[in-house]
Amino acid sequence: MPGEIMTVAEMSAADRAAVEAGTPTTVLMERAGQAVADVIRRRFARRPTVVWCGPGDNGGDGYVVARHLRRRGWPVRVEALAPPASPAARWAAARWKGQTGPLGSEPGAAELYVDALFGAGLSRPLAGEAERLARALIDPARIVAIDTPSGVLGDTGRPLGEVALKAGLTVTFHRRKPAHVLAEGRAACGEVVVVDIGLRTTGEGGLFENGPSLWAARFPWPALDAHKHARGRLMVVSGGAWNTGAARLAARAGLRIGAGAVTVLSPPDALAVNAAHLEAIMLAPFDGEAELQARAERADAVVIGPAAGVGEGTARNLSALARTGAALVIDADALTSFAHDPAALFSLLDGDDVLTPHPGEFERIFPGLLAASPERITAAREAARRAGAVVLLKGPDTVVAAPDGRAAVSLNGAPWLATAGSGDVLAGFIAGLVAQGMDSFDAACAAAWIHAEAGAAHGPGLIAEDLPGLAPMVLARLLAARGDG
């Protein structure tokens, strides 16, 4: 099943539903603490450990962790920020029979720390001894956080105040929260492990981890009797003679991802340059928007933007393409060409189209939205609603959002993708899948995941030209997982 991402409020509702269905809070706390202790024991050899316990239920989880580790022979000490305040936390503290002292008596002296001070729903900045710990520069590799590192907001991944703790390992329950998938939160959480404590309620926000479980069932594998035209006709608009490479990268990516027939639509002055570099990809000229529209009438999907040139000419070309039946993947220069009038761009779009901005381009067509939003998910969703199209907001935590509110966040971002031309390949992957009949939201999600897997597979030294050739390996893995490989 697709991996849902649940907000703090949705997780609180799941806890309440479990209690209302007959599972006491203390039982959930026992399950949670034991699960965290089990993860710790699997990851670390026995060592002196301090569990930092806050006054609420997160602290109650910490007392349970301490008890289970001590039962397994671990030398454990609890350091309490304050006396337990919730009924369940008092229950857990009463069952802890080991050593207890005040918080932070010797910060940094233990070999392992368990952060059970505050959970994801913290409502105020860290203060006092908790703030001192966050400023103590303890190696995050020695910290295991329960739910989220203290001070990190569960719904944004950002510190609530000036500082927050960081962990090398975070153990959370039932489902990931936004803090576990957004880049800033992931940097604070370290590795995230999700454990099952018997909750059954799921979120209703339509937010998912981007992975094959989300879209693999609808991936457009060719039928046994497939032919090239049945596999989709993709076209890519080239820039002028000195700006042709980006379009060829997108075209090659679309071909590698499975589109049956791919054509580069080229201005007359760029025909010779493109012809010298194309083999399986076809080439067709256009001179002005009317001829471009005529050429694209038979396309299932068209990429416009990579090195297309910023200006009125590109804007007119996009307007012409919008009059065809093709789904549009709009990137780079095509986005910037509408920076002066984003509403004009939105008026040309429909739900099959995909916008693929990096943050700078996002700011040009959705000015102020990213800064005004609590995090990237909210910004991408609002952008998709305004545009009436799918929006893929690039980054280490790429977010794909649909106009209907669905959104997915990539967890497999690869730093090697930060290279010129990488985004052109991504546009080609998306359009190649859309051309084969894949829903545009699914196609954008699948393309982003495949793109990142290809980047990670190559690693250091990656250049954009490598990416299309790495796609078949990733596709082969997907096919094998499906059972047809």
Image (cartoon, rainbow, N blue to C red):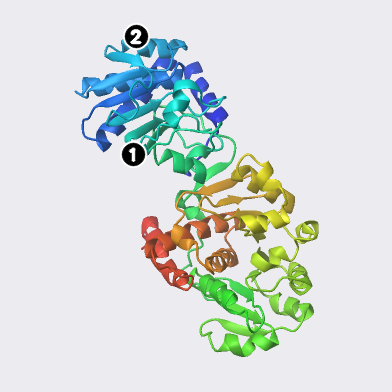
Which residue occupies 50% across, 70% down? Answer: 258
Which residue occupies 39% across, 27% down? Answer: 115
Is residue 300 or residue 36 the one in the foreground? 36
Give the amino acid type for the residue marked by disc 1 in the picture.
Ala
Question: Quadrant of the rendered structure where residue 251 is?
Answer: bottom right
Which residue occupies 79% across, 79% down? Answer: 290
Q: Is residue 98 left or right of residue 308?
A: left
Question: Quadrant of the rendered structure where residue 435 is?
Answer: bottom right
Is residue 394 or residue 469 the one in the foreground? 394
> Secondary structure under badge 2?
helix
> In the drawing, what numbered circle is on residue 94?
2
Residue 480 shows in the view = yes
Q: Position of residue 221 (x, y in %)?
A: 48, 64
Q: Find the residue positioned furthest to the left.
A: 73
Is residue 198 or residue 266 the one in the foreground? 266
Kindly report the distance in space between the C-alpha atoms of the residues bearing marks 2 and 1: 30 Å
Q: Position of residue 6 (x, y in %)?
A: 53, 35
Q: Is residue 161 left or right of residue 348?
A: left
Which residue occupies 43% across, 38% down? Answer: 189
Is residue 92 or residue 254 the one in the foreground? 92
Residue receiving disc 1: 141
Using a 10 Å C-alpha cutoff, classify the residue at mark 2 as few (fewer than 14 neighbours), some (14 to 19) or many (20 or more): few
Q: Position of residue 447 (x, y in %)?
A: 52, 60
Quarter the C terminus occupies: bottom left
Using a 10 Å C-alpha cutoff, classify the residue at mark 1 as few (fewer than 14 neighbours), some (14 to 19) or many (20 or more): some
Residue 31 shows in the view = no
